Amino acid sequence: MDNKRRGLLIIISGPSGAGKGTICKSFMERNEDVVLSVSATTRSPRKGEVEGVNYYFMSKEEFKDKIKSNDFLEYAEVYDNYYGTPKSNVEEVLESGKDVILEIDIQGALKVKENTQEGVFVFILPPSMEELKQRIINRGSETQESLMKRFKSAYKEINFVSKYNYAVVNDEVELAVEKLEAIIAAEKCRVDRIKDNILDSKEGEIHEQLYD
């Protein structure tokens, strides 16, 4: 009897400047058996980007056809280009027993929550709003106007934390990654996730004891 456990779908998001990208990169380096979901996009490839590694590149017509076919877990139009998470790719990895991480914005995460009954939703928080502001400033790529826009947006986005299963404060990256690992370990021990495997295993033991 095949008792292969289905992988976990782990959704990571949070306000700009919270450090979700840094956490995901560090987490992936420490957990090589976890797969980072690759998004599809209609924008042109940039220098050095590889098909199927950075993105799945497709035309707008192809993307719109996939929208009509309900082939995305979530999608959005950003600056005249489409971005989305292909449903079949994620499903294939989950069925193989591997975990999948989606690092997406809050809007995308909430769409995933609408479109699937599974998923572990983790919200990355900054240690404080002052620290968040400083991180955005340190990027050195923001004008005063865009800085205030991002900061106001972050204030609004933090209100969505109640829609998530877990919140991780990113005060130190290594500690934040350890918390994420602990969340995933706990989720894999939940009875509602493993009860079928437990029951199948026990039935097999009973069968062997009766008929061996």
Image: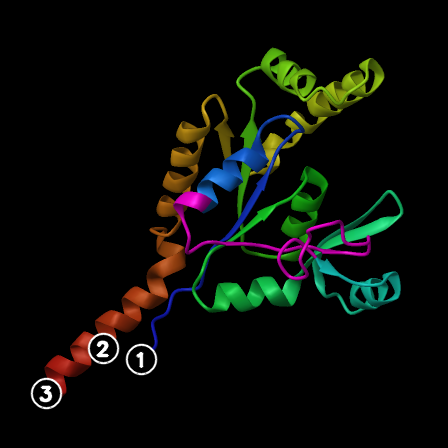
The quadrant of the rendering that contains the N terminus is bottom left
Going by the numbered disc 3, the residue's amino acid type is: Asp
The quadrant of the rendering that contains the C terminus is bottom left
Q: Which residue is mark 3?
A: 212
- The segment highlighted magenta reads 29-55
Q: In front: 92, or 79?
A: 79
Q: Residue at x 81, y 54 (%)?
A: 44
Residue 192 visible in image: yes
Going by the numbered disc 2, the residue's amino acid type is: Gly
Q: Residue at x 45, y 54 (%)?
A: 34
Residue 45 vertical position relative to residue 160 in the rendered view, above or below: below
Q: Which residue is mark 1?
A: 1
Q: Which residue is mark 2?
A: 204
Q: In front: 153, or 174?
A: 174
Q: Position of residue 184 (x, y in %)?
A: 41, 46
Going by the numbered disc 1, the residue's amino acid type is: Met
